[in-house]
Each structure stands twice: as C-alpha cells, then as structure tokens.
Amino acid sequence: MILVGIDVAKDKHDCLICNSEGEILFNAFTIPNSMEGFNNLYEKIKSVCDDLSKLKVGLEATGHYSYNLLGYLLDKGCPTFVINPLHTNLYRKSLTLRKTKTDKVDAHTIAMMLMSDVNLKSYSNTLYHNEELKSLTRYRFDKVQERAKLKQSITRLVNILFPELEKLVPMLHMKSVYTLLSEFPSAHHIAEAHLTRLTNLLHNASKGRYSRDTAIRFRKAARNSIGSNMPAKSLELKHTIKLIGELDTEIKEIETAIKEIMNNLNSPILSIPGINYRMGAMIIAEIGDFDNFSSPDKLLAYAGLSPSTYQSGQLTNCYSHMEKRGSRYLRYALFNATRFVCRWEPSFS
C-alpha cells in the first residue's frame, strides 16, 4: 500500500510518500497550490503506484484551502481521506513528547495515520459534490442572520422615530409597514403626509386590508407621537429597509438552488414531519454520509452535542456542558429540527 500525507496551506502543500512498511519513497517535498504543483504530485504518485486501488492519500480538513486539491485527486481516481485536524494533533502528540510542529512533520504524521487507522473512510465524489449543498445552506444561514440583525436595527430606529407604531400594527416586520416607513420614515413625515396619499399607500401595500380609517389612525398617532425628528435616523431607516429587501431576494434565490439539489437527492429526511427542505438540506449537508457514523453517539459527538466529562481522583464534575465542538450549523439544524418534530409528530410529544 502506498501512503501519501499532505499538509495543506494557502499557497503551498507539503507532501510525503511512503509505503505501508514505513519506507520513505519521497522525502517531504513542497508543491505550489497550482495546476503545475498538482500535476507534479500526481506524477510522483504514479511513479511508485501503478494500481490506484493500493493507494491512500490523506489530508487535513482545512476548509476551502483543501477544496481544489481534493477535487483534483478525486478526479484522478485517487482514494482520498480527509482527517480532522484535532485527530492529527492528538496523534502527533502520542508519537513524541517533543514540541515539534512543522508542515513537513504534519505531512509525515498524516501518512502514519493512514498506516495505522483502519477506521478511516475514503472521501467520495458524492461527498465532494455535497459541498455544493453545504456552501448554499451555510450561505443562506449567514444571510438570514444578517437580515435578523437588520430587523433589530429597524426596531431600534422605530422606537426612536415613531414608538407608537408598534401598537398600531400586528408586527413591525411586514411588507405594508416597510412600505410605509420607506415613504414616511418617521412620525414627523407621517404627520405631515396628505391623507389621500397615505391612504392609497397603505391600501396598496396591505392588498386592501388597510382602509382610510387606518390612515387616519396612523396620522393621528403620528401627530401626538413622542418620536424624535432626526433626519439622519430617518435616512438610516430607509436604507436598512432597502437592504432587507435585497437580502430577501438573495435568500429566495439561494433557497431555489437548495430546493433543486434536494429534489435531485430525493432524501427520506423530508418525510419526517416537521422537517422542511431548508432544515433537511442543512442536516444532510453538514453530516454528509450517514454511513460514516456507526452509532448515534458518534453523530452527536461530531455535532458537538455530547456532554463533556471531567474526573480527577475523587473529583467529578456535576454539571456537564456540551462539548460544542464540530459544526455549529449542524447543532443549530438539529436543535430546531427537534423542536419542529416534537410539535408535529405525536410520538415525540
């Protein structure tokens, strides 16, 4: 068996090639993060291994830095193993007491892990292309978080400019309210608005739910408002509403792409009551291949949901906290999925 350990970095990768007996075939060498470097690595591999079924290539999960090299190796048919950096660090410490950590040492450590760890599973093309779904779900998550912060800003600004508005509407974050505030971004502006213009604006924005009486009630509240007349805050409010509208459009576009992938996957996770395609997509994207986990406990550990334990002599911690290692996106998805499943599936109530 030919073993290749690769320590991935931004601009270069350190590699070491040995066999399963521990004989070094190519001492640690460095390749640039370029097609020329990738081809150089592959030529060295082919020079010592004609049968790729007798090859193991290992590299650390270093996020986007390893993505291009991983794709290249998979396209060439090289069995590739992606290793958790935490495992690499612990394994290196188990080999020596010396505090020596260099990129070349890490490449050798990864090769040794391939030699000793029979439980490693190769990274498949399915998992590689699953990164597309992961990118989309994480991108959507970040956009939704960004939108939530902007909505908090809207609440803050309305409390300054027209605090009485919250009691006049079911909720601030409605299309009709945003349309009103985009046109009249303070109590001062609403108080001076022409009644016909205000009525038409509210009627159209609410699709007929708000009438002339509503416009009169809004204007009366504005004329008696304690809200401040601050042009700078009014401008900030208008721009914030505009940004939320742009984010809404972007999120819808992302969700369309996610739904298309989920339709192609046809995953049974969507048959679980309470889990829609957005939540299901996030769970699938973060977990990848469920076959990589031999038990639910291992999946919980991967998500960072296992309780931490500490014992030393007669001391045992009484209040265990979650480890919170692993994917925060997966923890978020599992927590929320659990809430919805408990609500919609009677057997979990």
Image: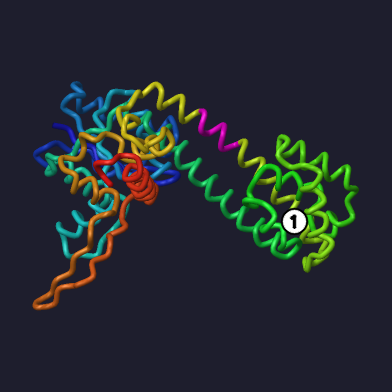
Along the line of sight, the residue nearer the viewer: 41 or 153: 153
Classify mark 1: helix, strand or loop.
helix
Q: Position of residue 216 (x, y in %)?
A: 82, 51
Q: Position of residue 247 (x, y in %)?
A: 62, 42
Along the line of sight, the residue nearer the viewer: 240 or 192: 192
Q: Is residue 39 above or below residue 197?
A: above
Location of residue 325 by image quarter: bottom left
Type of amino acid at the residue the image marks with label 1: Glu
Residue at numbered disc 1 = 236
Along the line of sight, the residue nearer the viewer: 334 or 22: 334
**Does residue 349 belong to the magenta stretch?**
no
* Residue at left offset 80%, top offset 48%: 215
Q: Position of residue 340 (x, y in %)?
A: 37, 44
Q: Is residue 348 left or right of residue 210?
A: left
Residue range in magenta is 250-256
Q: Main secondary structure of the magenta part?
A: helix
Q: Position of residue 99 (x, y in %)?
A: 24, 65
Question: Can residue 56 be seen by looking at this rendering?
Answer: yes
